[in-house]
Image (spheres, rainbow, N blue to C red):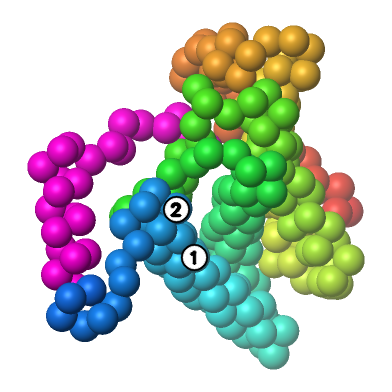
Amino acid sequence: MNNKTNNESSPHQSFSDEQAAADIEQAFGVKQDISLAGKNRRNLFMQFGVHGSIFVAALTFWAAADAWRLVSDLAFASGFSVLASVLFGIAMAHILHEWSHFLGAYFSRADYTVKEKPAPLFFDFDYKNNSKKQFLSMSIGGTVGNILFLMAIYFAIPMDSIGRMMLLSVAIGMTFYVSVIEFPVIKLASGGMSAMESLLAHLGQGQAILNIALLSGVVATMMSFLLIFL
């Protein structure tokens, strides 16, 4: 969820893109879409492919560790399943959070720019030109993604191993982490502030907010684990 940067091409670059598109169309009869919407679609497919690959890899890693723990009584296998759950939980919570942000922006018809290179924060929301309603849709969407991830683990995976308990705990901790960062911004924007005023009022406090969010996430994870385990 980044602020939109100045990604407009220079006149020289625009001319080069248009000339290249014309050359390709003339040579192969294929019309090239060089509009912002066309670039966003192209970049979105790339980002989806990268994030989807990470999703599959993380899920495979976790499933293998979980299966090893189930078929063996090794203490090392149980410990490894806990590590795999931590990594998988963080990766999945982040991916689902950011894509839920994007879906909130997309379905509210907000303006955004998808980055040209793979990135964890893969799109830039246009805070200047979008409405407060679009900002709230994008912001709330991210938290919805975390809640859905938490519910999916709770209802779909039996809590019959230490690794699975840790996975649920990490999902809870990540929900607390993003809530500390984003709920105050949503509250301020809902109360009358503009999107940028809300962001500056909360996140303008700097590293302290991120440290509090991180501490909240870690504490929530450990307390959840103890409660589930006991």
Front residue of 72/39: it is 39
**Mark toward the viewer: 1 or 2:** 2
Under mark 2, the amino acid is Ala
Magenta residues (range): 1-24
Under mark 1, the amino acid is Phe
Q: Is residue 94 left or right of residue 147?
A: left
Residue at label 2?
37
Secondary element under disc 1, as helix, strand or loop, is helix
Residue at label 1?
48
Q: In which quarter of the image is residue 185?
A: top right
Q: Does 169 appear in magenta?
A: no
Q: Quadrant of residue 65?
A: bottom right
Front residue of 22/171: it is 22
Image mark count? 2
In percent of width and height, residue 159 lies at 84, 67
- The mark nearer the N terminus, 1 or 2, is 2
Residue shown at 76% from the left, 46% from the top: 144
